[in-house]
Image (spheres, helix red, strand yellow):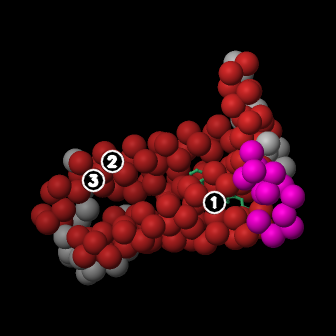
Amino acid sequence: MTHEGATWLLWLEHSGLGLAMRRSLWLYPFAEIVHILGIALLVGPAMMFDLRLLGWSRQVSVTAMAGHLLPWSRRGLALVAVSGVLMFTAHATEWVVSPVFWVKMSLIALAGVNVLVFHRRTFRSAVGWDAGAPVPPPARAAAVCSLALWTGAIACGRLLGYL
Ligand code: HEM
């Protein structure tokens, strides 16, 4: 890590927020609880949608499901990001040298790319396979990637405390 990078992380750790996150008995666990609620809200609806793309509940409209479920995933992502950054401030210099942390961030970034590609390309034709029709292979592939990437991010998040 560059000297400037280390300085910035030390500053973050010793900021009022970083200190409060370490010193308060309740703040860190509170952020952790919000993180887990955020994960439930982000990954739960995303996985339900993925399972629909993989052929479960074929009678349910794909576009209706997307309209209903995916805004909840976005709200979950906001909760996860805010609480994740809060926890990060408490031990910034330790997290950045953890390979598991960077694997986790990479999996989240890849999950974001998967969402973008799916919505910009594959989902545009969804009215053609909205209900009772086979889902095209690119949409199924996006669902498999989504399930694997979110599962990997959860596994890395859990492993952060151990590795
Ligand atoms: C967006 C940026 C994110 C940041 C900066 C972040 C950061 C963190 C940090 C610092 C921890 C604390 C680890 C510990 O105290 O042992 C953590 C825990 C965790 N994270 Fe994240 N995270 C983010 C997003 C996500 C996402 C998207 C997921 C899952 C889809 C996720 C899953 C987890 C899990 C499962 C834990 C363990 C919670 C526990 O054991 O109580 N995180 N995260």
Number of other residues with Cα within 10 Å of mark 1, as a class: few under 14, some 14 to 19, many 20 or more: many
Q: Residue at x 62, y 45 (%)?
A: 104
Q: Residue 21 colored magenta? A: yes
Report the residue marked by disc 1: 83
**Amino acid type, callout 3:** His
| Viewer-nearest residue: 16 or 141 | 16
Q: Earlier in the sequence, mark 1 or mark 3?
A: 1
Q: Is residue 152 left or right of residue 128?
A: right
Marks 2/3: CA distance? 5 Å
Question: Which residue is drawn at the image coordinates 39% and 47% (left, top)?
Answer: 114
The residue tagged 2 is: 116
Ligand 1, image quadrant it occupies: bottom right
Q: Nearer the viewer, residue 72 or 110?
A: 72
Q: Amino acid at mark 2?
A: Leu
Q: Going by the image, does 23 lie left or right of 160?
A: right
Quadrant location, the N terminus: top right
Question: Marks 3 and 2: in contact by CB < 8 Å?
Answer: yes
Label 3 crowd (10 A; few <14 / some 14-19 / many >=20): some
Q: Quadrant of the C terminus?
A: top right
Q: Quadrant of residue 107?
A: top right
**Inter-mark Cα distance, 1 to 3:** 26 Å
Image spot of residue 106 (x, y percent): 56, 39
User: Mark 1 near ligand 1 (CB under 8 Å)?
Assistant: yes
Q: Number of numbered discs present?
A: 3
CB of mark 1 within 8 Å of CB of mark 3? Answer: no
Magenta extent: 15-27
Q: Position of residue 38 (x, y in %)?
A: 57, 67
> Quick one: SS at disc 3?
helix
Please report the residue visible at 50 percent of the width from the left and 61 percent of the height from the top: 78
Q: Percent position (x, y) of residue 149?
A: 53, 50
Describe the element under mark 1 as helix, strand or loop: helix
Q: Is residue 114 above or below residue 33?
A: above
